[in-house]
Image: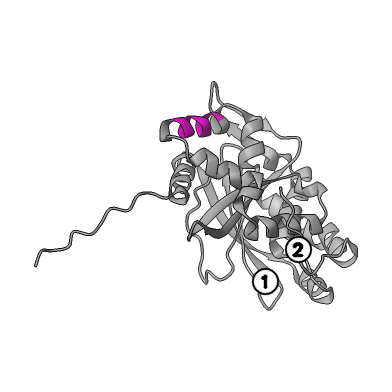
Amino acid sequence: MSESRGKTIPLSLPRRWVGDILHFGKDVPIITGERGVRVKKLVAARRSVSHPPSWQAIILKAVGLLSERVPELRRSYLSRPWARLHEMPYSVGTVVIDREYEGERAVFCAPLLYPERLPLAEIQRKCDAWKVGPVADHGPLRRQVRTTKLPKPIRRAMWGFGLNWSGYLKGRYFGTFAVNCLAGMRGRITQMCFPVTTYLYYGVPEKDGTMPLQFGFDHRVYDGYTCAKAIGILEEVLSGPILDEVLHGQPLVATPLSAAA
């Protein structure tokens, strides 16, 4: 009986675009840290309203509002044709989405323009539509699929131009910050690799009203002091304008609208 040598499995589109993310993310000198963020009042507020916004929508808007007060969070490092920083006039939050695509789990990255200007209800509707709607109906997801179908040299050249040469393209299509969730992992992220300036993982609030938050930032753009200051201001934003909107803002509908983005 001959010994099995296994089999070759071609890279699917999701495996290819994750490879592209890691290829460019490994060149970003990310500094990581973690801190508990106090959200006890916000936890109570979400329990007091019907169909509360998700923590994903809350964190996206909160970091957008934070970026108005801490402009360093809207900046990115560009290496070509010379080293410099670029500051976007508004924030772009990249939503990391885990969903099914062509029979396998896939991680999509959808940039959400100026979340600080959008109602929480609208952010929620967009995120829900990206998670469950047909990929072909949503521009950010459709663009990720279309780009990954290109030959590797062409798409890597496109990624490289957008990330290293043009501050506008980097902010618009890759985001000024990215948000992901730790819920259900029962562990900690020990390494982050993503080609944006700021990356945040948030967890489910604990019984004492503290939300675990892990973060990474590009040390070429700002320093630890700025990051620590920003996390402190984030608590103020969550307990101020975000809390007010959860209690008194536009109500969410029971069934999210599946509008194309």
Residue 28 got which mark? Answer: none
Q: Is residue 13 above or below residue 156?
A: below
Count neighbours of disc 2 (C-alpha within 10 A) and say few if under 14, some if 14 to 19, many if 20 or more.
Answer: some
Residue 224: tell me if it is visible: no
Residue 32: tell me if it is visible: yes
Give, as a single range, the part of the protein colored magenta: 154-161
Residue under pointer 1: 205
For residue 172, side relative to residue 239 (left or right) = left
Count neighbours of disc 1 (C-alpha within 10 A) and say few if under 14, some if 14 to 19, many if 20 or more.
Answer: many
Residue under pointer 2: 256
Q: Amino acid at mark 2?
A: Pro
Q: Is residue 144 above or below residue 239?
A: above
Given this view, does label 2 or label 1 mark the residue nearer the observer? 2
Quadrant assignment for the N terminus: bottom left
Residue shown at the point (55%, 22%) measured from the top left: 82
Q: Is residue 19 magenta?
A: no
Q: Are marks 2 and 1 in contact (CB under 8 Å)?
A: no
Q: Is residue 197 above or below residue 159?
A: below
Give 2 or 199, whichever is nearer the viewer.
2
Residue 145 at x, y percent in the picture: 53, 44
Residue shown at the point (67%, 67%) measured from the top left: 211
Residue shown at the point (47%, 54%) measured from the top left: 191
Label 1 sits on a secondary structure element that is: loop
C-alpha span from label 2 to label 1: 24 Å
Residue 74 at x, y percent in the picture: 69, 40
Q: Amino acid at mark 1?
A: Pro
